[in-house]
Amino acid sequence: QSALTQPASMSGSPGQSITISCTGTSSDVGGYNYVSWYQKHTGKAPKLMIYAVSNRPSGVSNRFSGSKSGNTASLTISGLQAEDEADYYCSSYTSSNTGVFGGGTKLTVL
Amino acid sequence: QVQLVESGGGVVQPGRSLRLSCTASGFIFSSYGMHWVRQAPGQGLEWVAIIYFDGSDKYYADSVKGRFTISRDDSKNTLYLQMNSLRADDTAVYYCAREVTTVYYYYGMDVWGQGTTVTVSS
């Protein structure tokens, strides 16, 4: 159950678009369309942003979108806003019938 | 409103046990798979365990397998995590979370509790 690989940090200016990657293997990300993304502010509970690779829960801004290619999933945030500054985590189902998270990406809005 | 509230955290000595509870409200608890997720100080999120909607299947992270047990009591709308043989590296904020759908598992977790802190220290 090795953690999925995410960049430790990323940054962007307001209005820009950024894409956070999440790399796994054929036993997790690449093998199933069960990738989800979470936004987490310090001291708060995680918030679901994307589920099943590309589905957005009601109430989540359409500036957030998800995709997958091979063993890598991606979260794209368009029109970056100051309130998007947070930690972002991907998660996937694994062939061991378990879940696994990525190491997290700290997003800074410049 | 849809809500999960954890309780049961605290300070415990290594090797001892602790049981966490997660009480659900605002939705049909018995229809959903439920997860426990934790975050150690300064670390990322770690998936801990899942229990299917009917309790028929339970799966665990390797780091807790054989020591932790997930269970549910639908009559009380409550999810549990029994933690035995606790170690210092189990120190974390523990969250319970609900599956986003009633049909699939691991699609995503859309409702989270506020977390309860477990500190394992002598």
Image (tube, rainbow, N blue to C red):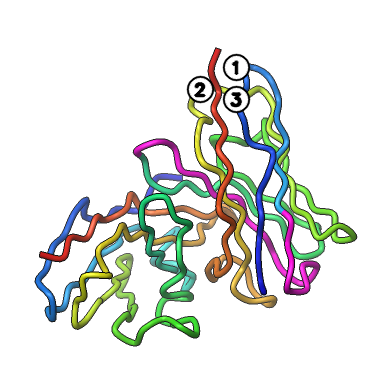
Position in image of residue B61 (x %, y %): 56, 43
| Chain ID of residue with mark 3 | B
Residue at (37%, 64%) from the top-left corner? A39
Q: Is residue A25 visible?
A: no
Q: How many marks?
A: 3
C-alpha separation, residue under disc 2 versus residue under disc 1: 6 Å
Q: Quadrant of residue B51?
A: bottom right
Residue at (52%, 49%) from the top-left corner? B47
- Helix, strand or loop under label 3: strand
- Foreground label between 2 and 3: 3
Residue at the spot of label 3? B11
Q: Is residue A20 magenta?
A: no
Is A39 situated left or right of B15 in this image?
A: left
Residue at the spot of label 2? B88
| Chain ID of residue with mark 2 | B
C-alpha separation, residue under disc 2 versus residue under disc 3: 11 Å
Dot 2 and dot 1 residues touching (CB under 8 Å)? yes
Q: Please tell me the numbered disc located at residue B6.
A: none
Question: What residue range appears in magenta?
Answer: B23-42
Position in image of residue A36 (x %, y %): 44, 68
- Helix, strand or loop under label 1: loop
Residue at the spot of label 1? B14
Dot 2 and dot 3 residues touching (CB under 8 Å)? no
Q: Is residue A16 visible?
A: yes
- Helix, strand or loop under label 2: helix
Residue at (54%, 71%) from the top-left corner? B107
